[in-house]
Amino acid sequence: MRKRILLILLLMLIAVSLISCQSFEEKKQLTLDKQTAVGFLIKSLAEKLRTLNDAHVKLGVKAIEYSTVLREEKPDDVKAAMKNTKAKINLFALQKALAYKTIVNDEYLRTYDAYQELMGASKQLELDMIMLTSFDETNFDRLLDKLEDILENVQPMAHELVIGDENIILPDLDSVWKEYVANYNAPSKH
């Protein structure tokens, strides 16, 4: 939470300084400030990607665990599983694990895209600094405006993923059953 507040304050400070920038030297400093902010966001998103990847792996392990218990209980279908307390508990847990896994995967993909955008913004800032130290300020205002747009679009992705039950779309039990349990109950043909 503290990082989020500091990041928001830093970005607000940069945005205010963009509006009030008058001199070319101020624009150079603003670019340096943006490089710092982008670097911070890149680190935040990299950490978020690691966290999401870990969660995805853990949820996959749990899904396997729950489907294994279901197969060991050997109910014939969802209706039979609902009559067996152990099977029922594991079927619902499997359903939720799969829903969470989908949410985490979707968030990972969005975060990865934001991370790539920031990597591109970082490269653009490097080029801006080369230009600032080599040329006059004629076209620099246009570049700063474009970078500001990128930062505004990507910054919200640095926040932590918060999952509430109201955001979960659970797969229906019959499809969970067919995909993760029924295929394993078939007798062996050896």
Image (tube, rainbow, N blue to C red):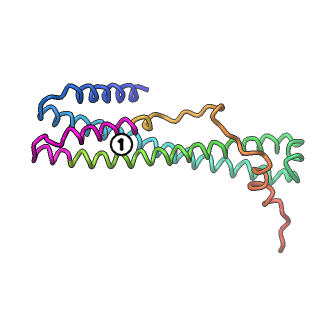
- 131 is within the stretch colored magenta: yes
Q: Quadrant of the N terminus?
A: top left
Residue 174, horizontal then vertical, whole percent: 80, 49
Answer with left or right where residue 188 lies relative to residue 151: right
Among the 4 quarters of the image, the one containing residue 4: top left
User: Looking at the image, which residue is at 73% across and 47% down?
Assistant: 66
Q: Position of residue 175 (x, y in %)?
A: 76, 51
The amino acid sitting under disc 1 is Ile
Residue pictured at 84% horizontal, 50% vertical: 73
Q: Which residues are magenta?
A: 128-154
Q: Residue furthest bottom?
A: 190
Q: Nearer the viewer, residue 172 or 54?
A: 172
Q: Residue at x 40, y 38 (%)?
A: 153
* Residue placed most toward the observer, 153 or 105: 153
Location of residue 157 by image quarter:
top left
- For residue 99, side relative to residue 92 (left or right): left
Which residue is identified by label 1?
42
Q: Is residue 104 left or right of 160 when viewed as pictured?
A: right
Q: Quadrant of the C terminus?
A: bottom right
- Which secondary structure dominates the residues rendered in magenta? helix
Residue 146: x and y in percent read 29, 41
Q: Secondary structure at mark 1?
A: helix
Residue 4 left/right relative to 167: left
